[in-house]
Image (cartoon, coloured by chain):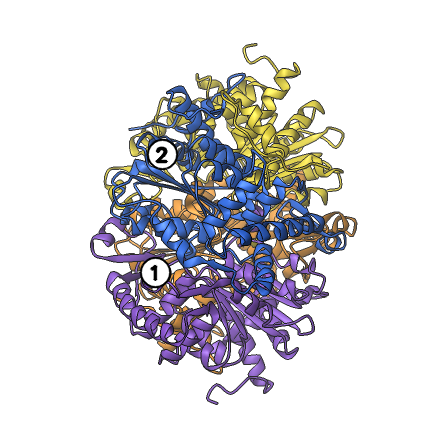
Chain colours: A orange, B yellow, C blue, D purple
Amino acid sequence: MSYIKDLRWEKGMQVKDLLNSYQNLGYQSIELKKASEVFVKMKKDNAKIFLTFTSNMVTSGLRGFFSQVIKLNMANVMVTTVGGIEEDIMKALGEKFSIGNFDSDDVDLNEKGINRVGNILITNESYMRFENEMLKILDRLYKKQKRWAISDMLREIGLMLEDESSILYQAAKNDVPIFCPAITDGAFGFHLYLFQQKHKDFIVDVVEDFGNILLVTSHDEKKGVIALGGSISKHHAILCTLLNGGANYAVYMTTAHKTSGSMSGATTNEAKSWGKVQYESDIATVVGDVTITFPLAMIGALEKLNEEGLLKNEKS
Amino acid sequence: MSYIKDLRWEKGMQVKDLLNSYQNLGYQSIELKKASEVFVKMKKDNAKIFLTFTSNMVTSGLRGFFSQVIKLNMANVMVTTVGGIEEDIMKALGEKFSIGNFDSDDVDLNEKGINRVGNILITNESYMRFENEMLKILDRLYKKQKRWAISDMLREIGLMLEDESSILYQAAKNDVPIFCPAITDGAFGFHLYLFQQKHKDFIVDVVEDFGNILLVTSHDEKKGVIALGGSISKHHAILCTLLNGGANYAVYMTTAHKTSGSMSGATTNEAKSWGKVQYESDIATVVGDVTITFPLAMIGALEKLNEEGLLKNEKS
Amino acid sequence: MSYIKDLRWEKGMQVKDLLNSYQNLGYQSIELKKASEVFVKMKKDNAKIFLTFTSNMVTSGLRGFFSQVIKLNMANVMVTTVGGIEEDIMKALGEKFSIGNFDSDDVDLNEKGINRVGNILITNESYMRFENEMLKILDRLYKKQKRWAISDMLREIGLMLEDESSILYQAAKNDVPIFCPAITDGAFGFHLYLFQQKHKDFIVDVVEDFGNILLVTSHDEKKGVIALGGSISKHHAILCTLLNGGANYAVYMTTAHKTSGSMSGATTNEAKSWGKVQYESDIATVVGDVTITFPLAMIGALEKLNEEGLLKNEKS
Amino acid sequence: MSYIKDLRWEKGMQVKDLLNSYQNLGYQSIELKKASEVFVKMKKDNAKIFLTFTSNMVTSGLRGFFSQVIKLNMANVMVTTVGGIEEDIMKALGEKFSIGNFDSDDVDLNEKGINRVGNILITNESYMRFENEMLKILDRLYKKQKRWAISDMLREIGLMLEDESSILYQAAKNDVPIFCPAITDGAFGFHLYLFQQKHKDFIVDVVEDFGNILLVTSHDEKKGVIALGGSISKHHAILCTLLNGGANYAVYMTTAHKTSGSMSGATTNEAKSWGKVQYESDIATVVGDVTITFPLAMIGALEKLNEEGLLKNEKS
């Protein structure tokens, strides 16, 4: 039995020290430490790790952290929404997103040609330069082949980018497939459409890509799911692991609650219904803003794995 | 200037009477009544109405209400996630979903072959019968043509169903296109994949369908968005109206909050940044469970339009 | 076993009809109908009903509905926070609260002498007139006796008011005690303080009032708790019923979630741990804005009780 | 203008380093870093700091952290609910709270004599030993004087305890008054009641205590409010600073949202309406579980102040 212990600050406190205090602190801090431990377990058990996130997290500075996580071999399959793909490319092209306010005057922003995602601002110019790049990218893809599964297309784009902090770049270099089941739901989709108007034999094959994610793992392999936020990215990873016999480890981090019956708010308890997860200690659901909670839990895991010599050398 | 007024129950109170009281009650009830009024405005202004919802709402009994809303010509374009398509078909086949509990013992449910969505339960048998039907459906589709845009495919399936309460059926009969940008993210996707394995020339063309939604409206047409829940269904409708100059009316109903920067929690204030919405009275954001709030707001609007003789005759 | 049923609008639909549809709709709508049924059960079982609410609900138009609920004998003990007392008095004095916006410019409002509670606005003038009235009220109270238990004081004030829609007035007339454990936490407290400065023998006895709420019921009596929102009003009613052996019925309506360990988000499941509640059907937790959910559930119960001839005649 | 920057983990990362990354990360992490900066500003500006928290935070291990914060002179006035007082005393008596689960079987817990607060468990024995101690405490208080303002009573109790980690003990030793406007809303109130039954001249004077909090500061003094969670503790501090001309700095940390018009969800924007706060940079509202967010923000501030030699020596 574990007991509540009083938290105490020590000068120069490391993130891992705070995580250790969270273990005995209360409410979501306990779940957060548990999430960190499940990350370590997944890794030690050689599970194939599915990392899913929504596009607003790529808008944030988590984008570079995700690419570091790939480099450190802590994510083996990724699922995201198309906005995440677009903004990773924009940032790889050098676009800068500025910090605004949740309660902005949106009419005023519109007049200045600024788009708002929560408290993050993106200019119209960024989208225009992205458009120019997309034209070049699609030309190069089309020259290579006419029919593309999405994850193959994203790997190819990743290899075109030259940015160590890019998710697509690191994923391509580290053989981590990125799945994006709703590839048309964004500016990317608009450019695909315009391109197809001129090249009727250009095909984006979503059905083939479903086969790709299905075969990315197997019933025999251990599987772990780290779902940040909800939406189809979370659902797609759960679906794929389910069709392969269910995940052995699951961590969900979200601001949604289970009371509305939505996928975003579904908890890891359901993971037990998959029939694979045996122990309460192999799952964690952390309610809170992912920009705060995910770095804490993952850094705690990275420090632990590094201490035990189990972390891949980032430089190699 | 409007003032708070004390609510008073009268015997035999109608839904529209309660809605009228909400107008002066406070907090989200005021927004709810406003949402109802924006529904009426959209209709009177002959706006093309985009109705979006997530699959958990089709799991619920809102499914039959959506089909009635189509019949009454209150939705002209729909966007949903693939789970919504699957469950509409399952219900059209006669499957019954039972009512459970948010705090179920999921291990126990799993052993009984029961799947849980919040407090709603679906048996494995329902999924198995759905699978059999899908095989027939795909055969018929393939015989007709090899390459399908998703909305065309869904219309074709709708015509195969014989259920007045089916969303797909009513949409097909009333020329309301249904868009589903992530068609592979569910059991439906799995069956598409298995079918394509045997029929390599079978293509689901998501890019073509982006053209379809793009051309479903125009800059000149008035446009209204009713987004229930978040996810890509909400985003897709916003994207399409944006590319056509922006919506003139917008109602968002959701349990998510704007503080995490997610699409699910984004408010209608941003609609003002699209440059089309001029007045505060043309938008509403209602925070709350959609199974409670949407029927209230829509019934209020239907009663009002009916009184003024502006509602399409359901029987015709 | 209950099944999900498709919702269908019928012209002239009554609130009770919608409630009946909620029963088979899904997620929180099912809980809402259950809440309505628990209200009916409490009444039929002659339970003593504790109704608790936070002050923001008195700011809203629920205030008049609460007073009607008292008149109809659906609330036998009330607990609230002091803001609720203040605003009930202000409204009894004729003050009008206007409707604003959640995203107001608060600096601007401040310059205009306007105070904001969510989307409801109260002028400084209203507070000033309340202050004048408080001086008269305290003088009258002091002339009667020097030491006051709070619930006795509130009854006395209720008898001074002449407003059928006033909570204090109806409570006093119908022998419903109102408890307010933090009586000093508002403008009311400030006026008590100023008065005591001049009258050192004036004592507000909170400890005596704890005895009053404790003895308002007994172990033998059936007890029901309707807690709207969280805070000490909810806690105080639970505490009192616990010390009397636990409630037999409990309905919590709130926007808070259980994940933070707060009283506001605590669910009725805990009611089972009190050892009195036997059946799942005697409790309900409804997540959502109380201005929307409480009228629905209570009107449903009033209609039902009225049909069965079990409702007190309001006119008597 | 600030820009979003990619987060990058470095081995042995300190909490303050992570805080610095949060500054440019996104959504609530940006607000969290801002909260930390406002803490530093309050201190540097010699503001009188009001720290408020709800009882569930004392149930958690934040309790010892609050007492350290007092010792370090980062809290000058405290407001809490009575459960927080009770549990601080229980812990000072050596009671241990164990860690459970949000989804416990509450009927089973009840049979075992265990009470649940979220995922924290308290035994009936702990309450019984608290009761015994209360009898001794009340005897000693009564011998000293018959009429007590609450904050005086709490200081006296603090001096009786011998636990460096106790909030009451550290507050008493460091001349930090603790206010608790609803002192009867808990087991503490029950014991006060039983005691008063035997000693009719024993008076707890809440009105006098309102004077105490009113005079704890002045219009001339700079004031800062740190409100953790909502309820009357938050409201009481805001009320007191308002009556003294308004706070100059305000940080609210909560899981509640502003959409329901509740005090718990009210944001710091309203602080601007008080007329004192001039700059956006002097306020912050952080949505999230306080057990995670408060340690992060406060540790960041302590490290910063310590580096600049502005932190009181804890040992002195």
Q: Which residue lies furthest to the bottom in this view?
A: D316
Is B296 left, or right, of B221 in this rendering? left
The span from disc 1 to disc 2 (Cα, nearest Å) is 29 Å
Give amino acid for label 1: Ala
Q: Position of residue D229 (x, y in %)?
A: 50, 60
Q: Residue furthest right?
A: A111
Give amino acid for label 2: Val
The residue shown at (56%, 84%) is D311
Q: Which residue lies furthest to the top in this view?
A: B316
The residue shown at (72%, 25%) is B45
Q: What element carries label 1?
A: helix
Q: Which of A49 and C229 is in front in this view?
A: C229
Badge 1: chain ID: D
Which dot marks residue C38? 2
Give the labeled residue for mark 1.
D187
The answer to whether residue B252 of the structure is visible from this angle is yes
Residues at marks 1 and 2 touching, judged by CB atoms closer than 8 Å: no
